[in-house]
Every structure is written in C-alpha cells, then in structure tokens.
Image: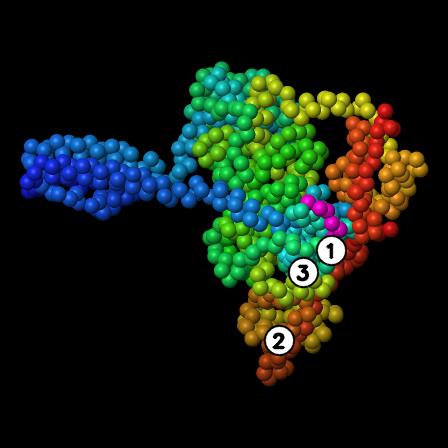
Amino acid sequence: MIRAHVKSCFRGGRGSARAKKCRAKARTEPRPPGSEMPPGLISAYIIVAVLLTLTIGSKCPADQLSFLRPTIESCQPKLVKVFGAGAGRIESYATGILVSADGHVLTTQGAILDGRRVRVLTTDGSSYDASVLKRDRKLQLALLKIDARTPEHFTLGEQSVGQKGDWVLALSNAFRVADKDEPLSVMMGIISLRTSMTAKLNSRDIAYQGDLVLIDVITSNPGAGGGAVVTSDGKLVGMIGKIINSSKTNTRLNYAVPNATLYRFFNGLQEPDAAQKNGVQPGNIAAVDLGIRIFRLGGKRDPAYVDRVISGSPAAAAGIKPDDLIVSIAGVKIGNVRQFEQVIKQPTDGSDQILVVKRGRKLLRLTVSTGEKGQ
Amino acid sequence: MRRVNFFPRRRSDCLLAMACVASALLFSESLIAQQNDSPFQSLKVLPEVFRSAERTVRPTLVTIESFGGISAVAGKIGGIRSRGEGNTTGVMISPDGYVVTSTFNFITRPPVITVIPSDGKRRIAKLLGQDKIRKLCLLKIEDVQNMPVPEWVDAEKIVVGQWSLSLGVGYGDLSPAMSIGIISAKNRVGGRAIQTDANVSPANYGGPLIDLKGRVMGICVPLSPGSQAVGAGVEWYDSGIGFAIPLSGAGELIERLKNGETIEPAFLGVRSMLDPDGTGVRIEEALPNGAAKKAGVLVGDVIVEFDGRSVSNPIELGTMINRHESGDTVTLTIDREDADEPLQIVVQLGSVPPPKGKSSPLEPPPIR
C-alpha cells in the first residue's frame, strides 16, 4: 500500500523534490485500523486504493517551486516584442500587450512607430508587420494590429485592477534582453500607490491626465514601455508607460497606465478628465486679476511674497496685505514665484477661492471672491 | 503491495476499515494540498499585512512643504539636479510636535517650511538642529498636543533578512507610496545605518522604514560610504541600496537636535598614505588649522593605533574617523622617527572645511 502510494507519486512527479516530498508524506501516513478483511474484497480494495493514489499523484504538487509560475506562463504568450525605427538615443525596441483575439497590440507611442516598418514578434518567435491603427500623444499610447489570430490576450475593462500593497509582476523586454522567441524578463514588486496625474504630478512631466499606478518594480528602463503589469493571479493592472521624470522628486517614475485607461483608449472613449475640462472651455474665460503684485526682485524660486495689493481688487477685499507670503491658492501649493505665476494664469470658473497666506508666524485662510471681475 | 494476512471477523469491520482507509487517503490529499500551499500561503496574505502595517504608521507621517529656496546647488547632487518641487516626508516623534526628517529635504535652503500632520491642518514649522552625518534634522510645530507617534523597533532586534517597507509622500499624495524589501545589512556607513533593498528615494527621504507590524525601524536618508556631502547617496535612489537611521535609544541625539545643535562629520585634517616601512598610516600633509596639526601631529609621523585599535591603512583610518563626529576626542598612537617609543597624542576632531574659493553654493537666498 505504502509502496503503491510512493510509486504513483513518482509517476506523477517530474522533479525529485516533489517525489521526495511525497515519499516523506507516505512514510508518515497512518496505518489503517481494523486490519483484517476477506480476500475477495482485497482486490476491490486494491483497485480503489490505486485509483485514489493515482488521483493524489496527479494532484500532488500543482507547482511546488513558484506560486507565480502558472501566472508567468499564462502571461508570456499575451505579450509581444515590438521593433521599429530608432533615432539617436531613442531605442528601436519596445514591448507590447495583446488585447484582442484578432491581433490588436497596445504599446507606447513614440518615434519607434515613425519608421517605414513596425515589426511585432509573438511569443513563438513569429514575426509580423504591424499597422499602426491609432496613436495618442497625450496618453502616449498606440494601438497596433498584426494579421494573426491571438487567442491568448489580456482582458481590458473599466474596473481598476489591484490595490496598494498587492503583489505585481512586470513583464517586459527591457534592454532587449530577450531575443526572438525567448520569454520576456519578469520582475516582482508591489503596487506603491494609485494616484492621479492631474493633481499629483506636474503637468510638465507628461501631458497625460488621469490615474496612474505607481509600482516599486524598477521598470523605467529602455524597451520596457508597453510591458504588462499583472497581479499575482495574472490580471492586467496596466501597461508600463514611457520613461518619465517626476518634477516632484526629480526621479524616474516606475508606473503603469491603468487598465481602465487602456480600455478607454482601445474603445475610443473619452477620458473622464478631458470631458470635464471641456466644460470649463479653457481660454474662454480670461484669468482674473486678483490684484496681487508679487515681489519679483529675487529669482523665480523665491517664495511668493506680496509686494503690493491693488486697491479695490479682489485681493484687497479679501484682506491680503503686503509682506504676506502666498502659501496656497485654491488648494494648490505655491512654493515659489514661478508657481504663483503659473497658477494665476489658470482660468477660473468665477467661484470664490481660498487663499492661504503666512503673516508673521501665523497662517491665515482668506476667501477671495473672483465673481464680479470674471464676468 | 505488501502481502497481508488479515481476515476480518465481521463484514462491518471490513467496511469500517475501507472507510477509514478512504478517509485517511482523502485527508492526506488535503494535507498534501495544504503542504503544497503553505510555503506560498504567507506570500498570499502579505499584501494585507503590508497594508495593515502602513495603516498603523500612517497617522504619524507628516507632509512637509518648502517655500522658496535656491534653484539648484552647484552642479548635480548625486546625478539629479536639485531636490524636485514636491512635498517631502517626516515622522512625528513626540505628541507636542517634534518632527524628524532628512536634511536632504532642505537642500535648497527654503526660508519657509510648513508641516501638515495627519489632522490635515497646515502649520508653520521651525527648523531646529541638524545631524549632517546621519542626514537628519528636527522640525517643531507649535500649539499641538496629542499628536500620534509611532512605535520604534529596538535597533538591536532588527534582523538581516526581515521584511521592511519604506513609506513617503513625495509623489504628492497624502497617502504614502509604499515599497517593500528586506533588511540587507546592519551597521552600515560608520555603523549608524541599516541597509534595505526597498526603494529609497527623494520620494521617501525623511519617511519611515517600518516592519510588518508598522513599527519604525529607521528614517530613510541618502547616505554614501564615500562622502558626507548633503546630497551624497542620492545617486543610489531606487537602486536596491537604501539606508535608514534607527533612532531607538537615540534620545540624547534627539535632545541635542532639539537644542538646535548642528552635528558635523569628523575631520582629522591630514593627507596620508600607507607607511612603506610597515603597517601604519604615514602623514604626508597636515592641513593648517586641521585637528591633527593643532594637536601636534607632524608630517612623517606614522599613525599605528586609533583609540587603541591598530590602523593598517588610510581607508581603515577613514572608517574609524567616520565613526566619530566633529568635536570628539580620540587618542592616536604615533611612531615618530626621533622618538624612542610610540607617542600618545590626544586629538579633538574638527569639521570639514568649506570648499575653497567662492562661498558655499548652499547659501540661502536673501530674505527680505
């Protein structure tokens, strides 16, 4: 009985580690009590036992070496290598993700797509010429299509996938390490933060407005753009974006463009933020002159101290005084003169704005009414 | 199959036996499944543990805002220019409003600093003392009480290989960004830092490195074994080599910072080389006004011991000096050619002189 168990494990086993484990298991198995039965039943017993051990044998270890292996193996065929034009220091290679059964590939927008030919290599090493269906300079995304059936593909959707702290795998061809049909590089980490580009990162960093998944896997490397960031069970969190430098920290960001954004891009839906912005109609409302004149003798990185307040202006009505330090306007921190100038140029919707100023050792919240002048 | 010699006396016994065998087999199957899962079960629950650790410490994090400051220090700071425009991170260490953070966050010398604790109210902060060796400094906000403070891990009990999480609000969200890793080493950079492979960068300098229970193991700072310049070590941001300073039992240091003290790296003030005649470090030059010269160390002297520990080469000497701070007194054992026996010279270590030529590039801007 014991030997049969061991044997079946061997049969099912591929690695010695697994077999060893099963053997250890078998040794410790309790002997069945009530140890006598008629010979007629022994054969039936044997058959049942063998059948049972066989099922155990086949179930024995789905995968003892890595709980991520099934995920990685199922994801690899859903990614492609993208090759195109290189220019100067811009790489001629990237990664892409398959998002339909008809050969739709999402990747990052860039000079790589400007050449005569864009080539896509699927996981089996087959090479296809890809046509560029659409490119979005703001989202920095591009949709390609190859003439192939691609039953293995990621599922896009409106729901956000993965939360802060969840394990993620990043698969990409960073540095073009993988050649031809070689599998892509896989790295592991967690989701650091789900944040929004609009408010959190400076608009100079990237034109893209919307949500962003920061990860602690270092993906900001050449060729990684277009790679996949997936949860430990293989769901698509997002796509590795182009390399961007955050002006907040002066460091490179490691991030994924979320699945929902990819879904909207793929389906030609408008970004919610963009729709909101259209309501405001930038440019149609002139920036309101609050009547604050900033002390400008220093550099643009100097703190925004008030030099003068125009009498009768909204600022004067709100009680802003010379020598006040502007700390924030409408919730936006004013770190220096340059940031003040940027914010003051923004169109307003005519509603009241909260200004925080530092006067002496105190912070004051003042309400500035921009209504009358705006109309 | 073993040849067995068993005949049940009754049929029910036989059925019972079969049932037992079957259940034993089924049980063992689930056991195997469990056993197969167990190495990974802990990995699967870890994200929840990470989040709970973060939730535990989050109320003690503060967002630090800087207003104004110089545009950039001369040249690059470890591969990146300036500090970035974003907020930085600090940790509340006392209920009455003392905040510890990294000196790196004030590299641009901002004349105005504000702190936003977990209650969301912005307050003006005063910069107190600085430790230029550990790259730490202390801020104080007034008129607060009952501020939440974190629990600290006893530095002695930190174990290499244990999980560690770095947290920081540098990306501009009040919710901190989180990165995980392990403790890579202890007693790094002059014996003052612990090393981690979690991401450490301007996004979390001044923020905590915590364990899985949400207790603070150290404060993330940029450090470099080769230099003690304020920006040194930033070149290793997000590289897998990150440092944090444990502060458990550092009550004395905190008191000094509260009193506004500036702690400077130690400087012996000599140029030295390996002594060609034997083991020891030969003085090639003693800088004028340097600590060594003041104490009477001469060119040609060979330092053989530093505080009673033998010195075999200049790098070792440098490491020993780095374990001290400016103002510390040390005893050098020196072989001098015309002396019969080794001399004992007591030296009060000085601080690194400002760079020659122009005034320091880190002067704050004029404030009106």
User: Residue A78, image x and y in percent?
Assistant: 46, 26
Seen at 46% across and 43% down, the residue is B46
Q: Is residue A324 above or below residue B14?
A: below
Real-space Cα separation, disc 3 to disc 2, in angstroms: 24 Å
Quarter of the image where the C terminus of chain A is located: top right
For this rendering, which residue is in front, B139 or A66? B139
Q: Of helix, strand and loop, which one carries label 3?
A: strand
Q: Is residue B154 above or below residue A183?
A: below
For this rendering, which residue is in front, A124 or A266? A266
Seen at 69% across and 24% down, the residue is A276
- Residue range highlighted in magenta: B120-125
Q: Earlier in the sequence, mark 3 or mark 2?
A: 3
* Location of mark 2 (residue): B331
Q: Would residue B332 be visible to someone looking at this image? A: yes
Q: For the residues labelled 1 and 2, say whether their Cβ atoms are less than 8 Å apart.
A: no
* Location of mark 1 (residue): B142
Kindly indicate the quadrant of the structure image that contains residue A314: top right
* Location of mark 3 (residue): B131
For this rendering, which residue is in front, B185 or A1? A1
Seen at 66% across and 29% down, the residue is A209
User: Residue B3, image x and y in percent?
Assistant: 8, 41
Q: Earlier in the sequence, mark 1 or mark 3?
A: 3
Magenta stretch contains residue B123: yes
Q: Of helix, strand and loop, which one carries label 2?
A: strand
Position of A96 compared to A276: left or right? left
